[in-house]
Image (cartoon, grey):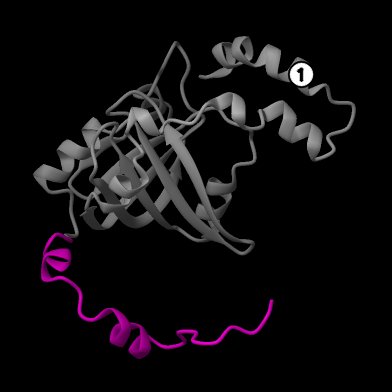
């Protein structure tokens, strides 16, 4: 990478550039799930969980019907680990480094909710049964011990127009999963057949 001038290399330089934090941005951070934050979590059908391990950092999307993250108490969240591709990047990271960060999204709502904490992986059968969907239980549940919680204002979602129907992208203008796998050189792979079979496969394997 070419040498770049004007790079920030210290906290002092950063703070001089940006100035002090807005006091409200500090006041909204708590170390427990306050009543307003509970309502946001219960209304969210989608989140992204970030984790870190020896290989680096990772972000993984998770989604289910709203309320899929259970609030066990004001400092504990329970997140089912649904069927996926078995890479288990998040779970492997948690075993080696329990630090995680979650950001909750609610369709049509500009604010998001950020949760930082430490996680562990639970497989108690009675606990798994609480998360049964379509007759199937998750293989594990991620328990997050909450350390900080705060909401993020609307600016990012407003700038991106994420929930604006007029800003929707025509899916046909972008590569399909089959296209991507084919372009990346997957061996003995028929991308068109993969895409054609995916709707039925998704229905059968979503849980």
Q: Is residue 85 left or right of residue 152?
A: right
> Which residue extends farthest right?
188
Residue 52, given in percent of the width and then of the height, sits at: 52, 60
Q: Examine the structure image and report whether residue 166 is included in the region drawn in magenta.
A: no
Element under label 1? helix
The local crowd at label 1, few if under 14, some if 14 to 19, many if 20 or more residues have their Cα within 10 Å, is some
The span picked out in magenta is 1-29
On screen, residue 109 above or below 160? above
- Give how far across and how far down residue 125 sits, in percent: 43, 27
Is residue 9 magenta-colored? yes
| Quarter occupied by residue 107 | top left
| Left or right: where 175 falls relative to 204 | right
Task: Tell me which residue sits at (66%, 32%) in the image.
Answer: 175
Rendered residue at 40%/19% (across/down): 132
Measured as percent of width and height from the top left, residue 88 is found at 59, 42
Name the quarter where the N terminus is drawn: bottom right
Left/right of residue 152 with respect to residue 99 in the rendered view: left
x and y, in percent, of residue 174 in the image? 62, 32
Q: Which residue is mark 1?
A: 192
Q: Residue at x 72, y 26 (%)?
A: 178
Q: Is residue 120 left or right of residue 184?
A: left
């Amino acid at each position: 990478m070419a040498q770049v001038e004007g790079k920030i290399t210290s906290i002092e330089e950063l703070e001089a550039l940006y100035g002090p934090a807005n006091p409200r941005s500090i006041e909204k951070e708590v170390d427990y799930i306050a009543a307003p934050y509970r309502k946001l979590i219960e209304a969210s059908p989608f989140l992204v969980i970030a984790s870190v391990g020896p290989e680096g950092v990772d972000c993984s999307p998770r989604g289910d019907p709203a309320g899929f993250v259970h609030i066990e108490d004001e400092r504990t969240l329970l997140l089912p680990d649904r069927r996926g591709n078995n890479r288990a990047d998040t779970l492997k990271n948690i075993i080696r480094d329990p630090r995680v960060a979650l950001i909750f999204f609610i369709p049509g709502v500009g604010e998001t909710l950020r949760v930082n904490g430490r996680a562990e992986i639970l497989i108690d059968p009675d606990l798994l049964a609480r998360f049964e969907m379509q007759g199937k239980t998750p293989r594990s549940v991620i328990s997050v011990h909450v350390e900080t919680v705060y909401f993020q204002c609307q600016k990012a979602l407003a700038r991106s127009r994420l929930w604006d129907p007029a800003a929707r992208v025509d899916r046909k203008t972008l590569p399909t999963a089959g296209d991507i796998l084919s372009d990346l050189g997957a061996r003995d792979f028929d991308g068109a057949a993969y895409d054609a079979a995916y709707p039925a496969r998704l229905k059968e394997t979503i849980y």
